[in-house]
Image (tube, rainbow, N blue to C red):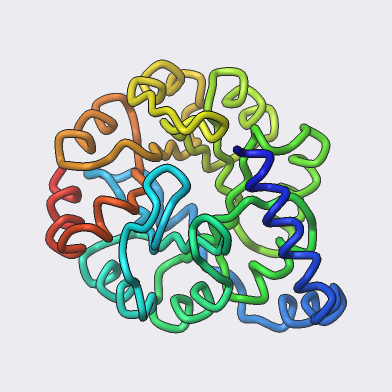
Amino acid sequence: MLDQLLAGSLEDARARRELRSSAQVEAEALGRAPALDALAALAPADHIKVIAEVKRASPSRGDLAEIAEPQTLAAQYESGGASAVSVLTEERKFKGSLADLEAVRKAVSIPVLRKDFIGDEYQVLEARAAGADLVLLIVAALPQERLVSLHTMIRELGMTPLVEAHSADEVARAVDLGAQLIGVNARDLRTFELDRELFGRVADQIPAGVIRVAESAVLDVADVAHYREAGADVVLVGEALVTNDPVATLQSYLSV
């Protein structure tokens, strides 16, 4: 499944490149105001921080929510106390778009993450051109040399890479990379099975000073507390927010 998702995202990016060249997108990226400091926004605090996600659908759950105006939802997230907003831009299975990201960027003053299956430089340029402050890199999807080059490019453009791991070996690769923001996803993107205990097993591998993000398997306050007790600084939440009252749900998480 992961290979299919990455291949689809790269194919869609190639189609967009036929309409807008790399040079055009690079000029747009370099012409934007500097990216926001996501590491400062997500720095450890005396309570859990939340990256709140604009998420219409997923391969594992199908359609989740009808989100006609992602900017309105994102503004609710900000007013509810989110530290950043994640925007799914993958079109085929998650029903997102770069237009969603652009709309969200205009509506909020907190950092915005481009969450997609990133595999080439054009996609990184697109992220900055659309206003992203963070870009997701999935360790399992990329050989280490490619991971290093994309991580370097994201940082050179002033953005922050969120490096996502799904195993102890992948956490080690993220640490070797020098990542300052490491996510541990409880959902295996090859099988889509959930392992809520994965974060707790690998959290100690993440060095002090690196921000630790727990992803997936967050449905209620007890799940947030579970991750907080295991050492998470941040949780990334989508489904639970788009299928419930987003502000009330978010604020209940921030009490942890």
- Please name whichever residue, 52 or 134, is drawn nearer the observer in this view of the structure: 52
* Location of residue 231 by image quarter: top left
Residue 47, compared with residue 16, is above or below; it is above
Residue at left 43%, top 23%? 203
- Please name whichever residue, 185 or 190, is drawn nearer the observer in this view of the structure: 190
* Location of residue 154 by image quarter: bottom right
Q: Where is residue 42? Give x, y as percent.
A: 40, 52
Q: Where is residue 150? Give x, y as percent.
A: 75, 49
- Please name whichever residue, 225 or 152, is drawn nearer the observer in this view of the structure: 225
Q: Seen in the image, is 226 located left or right of residue 233?
A: left
Q: Where is residue 71? Give x, y as percent.
A: 38, 79
Q: Seen in the image, is 40 located left or right of residue 165?
A: left
Residue at left 29%, top 69%? 78
Q: Where is residue 142? Give x, y as percent.
A: 73, 37
Residue at left 68%, top 39%? 3
- Please name whichever residue, 210 or 169, is drawn nearer the observer in this view of the structure: 169
